[in-house]
């Protein structure tokens, strides 16, 4: 397809983005970046990990998004006594027919909110792995496909570590984006006060259906990405593994493990979705730079030396983007 045709198609099909954002903004004050990146995850079917202190509307943002999409939604409160069967389902015995039948769990939905995911033990977290990566669940001897779109949005609290289980690296890598929610500005806080204490219920009107999202995803995949931009994405990911090859020698002793090939795939997909949200049928290097930190921050493992110097993965990612030449 010609790039001009893609551009026109994207402009036509991205009209709903403004409506969807406006509906979510009826409830969520500020946090425009978080809303935009949640939509990126939705359009590229990439799971999202949202981190922030309690009370910053992490759960409310996901619930509001599901209401605006007219989709099936399940909220799962992760606790230390949760079992894998509580999530994916199990085989149940029917004494009248003397046979087992499958009782599907709450994960069989379009949008899953895994609230405080780091409170569940490793067994439960690993039960999510197959669902997140393969979009299927195995119960007994049979495998069952999950509905499409299927998206896991997980929240975690970064400050209270008592009674929490750190997410395994393999699972963290399954999340396309790791978002950090910060405190609102003073003017936004006053808006929150007025909106949430008025006593009136805010009604969210559905803007788009799951079928329309599946159709839109096809358009997002067709967005044009130039060879130079592809090379730029590969260079960024390789710089996390071998920074000395890109004259960023200071980072070499700070990085224990760089980003995996999944980072390259997700960075490309997220950049295409970002371009779509802005009504463009092509990806620019600026798109990659804007979405890059959210794709890479949870994929780089730092050394003890970096921790001793109080370096964060965000600092490392910034140095990589500053050091790699932009096409």
Image (cartoon, rainbow, N blue to C red):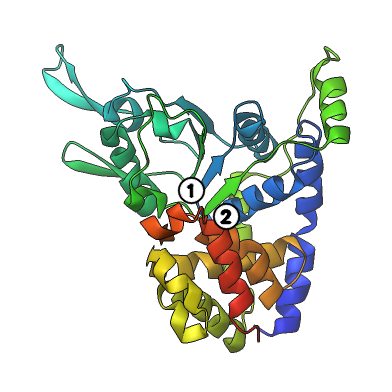
| Spot occupied by residue 183 in the image (x, y as percentages of width and height) | 72, 36
Position of 57 with respect to 295 (left or right) is right
Viewer-nearest residue: 248 or 18: 248
Label 2 residue SS: helix
Q: Nearer the viewer, residue 188 or 277?
A: 188
Q: Is residue 69 above or below residue 256?
A: above
Task: Name the residue beneath numbered marker 2.
Answer: 214
Q: Are marks 1 and 2 in contact (CB under 8 Å)?
A: yes
The residue to which callout 1 is attached is 148
Q: How crowded is mark 2: few (under 14 residues within 10 Å), some or many (20 or more)?
A: some
Q: In this view, does 214 lie to the left or right of 196?
A: left
Q: Residue 1: x percent and y percent?
A: 64, 83
Q: Quadrant of the C terminus?
A: bottom right
Please tell me whether residue 78 is drawn above or below residue 213 in the rendered image: above
Write the residue at 54% across / 53% down: 177
Q: Which of 246 and 287 is in front in this view?
A: 246
Percent position of residue 169, x then y: 35, 51
Left or right side of 149 for 94: left
Q: How far apart are marks 1 and 2 (CA)?
A: 7 Å
Residue 31: x and y, percent? 74, 42
């Amino acid at each position: 397809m010609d790039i001009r045709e893609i551009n026109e198609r994207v402009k036509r099909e991205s009209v709903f983005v403004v409506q969807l954002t406006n509906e979510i903004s009826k409830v969520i004050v500020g946090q425009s970046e978080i809303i935009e990146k949640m939509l990126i995850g939705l359009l590229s079917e990439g799971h999202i990990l949202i981190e922030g202190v309690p009370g910053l509307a992490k759960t409310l943002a996901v619930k509001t998004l599901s209401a605006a999409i007219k989709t099936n939604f399940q909220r799962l409160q992760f606790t230390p006594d949760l079992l894998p069967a509580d999530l994916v389902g199990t085989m149940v015995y029917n004494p009248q027919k003397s046979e087992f039948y499958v009782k599907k769990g709450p994960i069989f939905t379009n949008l899953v909110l895994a609230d405080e995911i780091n409170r569940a033990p490793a067994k439960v977290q690993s039960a999510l792995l197959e669902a997140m990566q393969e979009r299927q669940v195995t119960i007994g001897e049979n495998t069952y496909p999950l509905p499409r779109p299927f998206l896991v949005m997980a929240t975690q609290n970064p400050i209270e570590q008592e009674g929490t289980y750190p997410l395994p690296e393999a699972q963290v890598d399954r999340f396309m984006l790791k978002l950090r929610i910060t405190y609102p500005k003073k003017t936004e806080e006053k808006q929150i006060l007025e909106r949430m204490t008025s006593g009136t219920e805010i009604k969210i009107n559905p803007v788009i259906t799951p079928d329309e999202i599946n159709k839109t995803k096809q358009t997002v995949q067709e967005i044009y990405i130039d060879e130079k931009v592809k090379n730029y994405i590969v260079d960024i990911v390789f710089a996390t593994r071998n920074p000395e090859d890109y004259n960023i020698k200071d980072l070499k002793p700070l990085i224990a493990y760089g980003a995996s090939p999944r980072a390259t795939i997700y960075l490309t997909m997220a950049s295409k979705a970002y371009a779509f949200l802005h009504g463009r049928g092509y990806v620019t290097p600026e798109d990659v730079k804007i979405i890059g930190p959210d794709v890479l921050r949870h994929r780089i493992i730092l050394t003890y030396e970096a921790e001793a110097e109080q370096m964060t993965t965000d600092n490392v990612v910034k140095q990589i983007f500053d050091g790699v030449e932009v096409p």
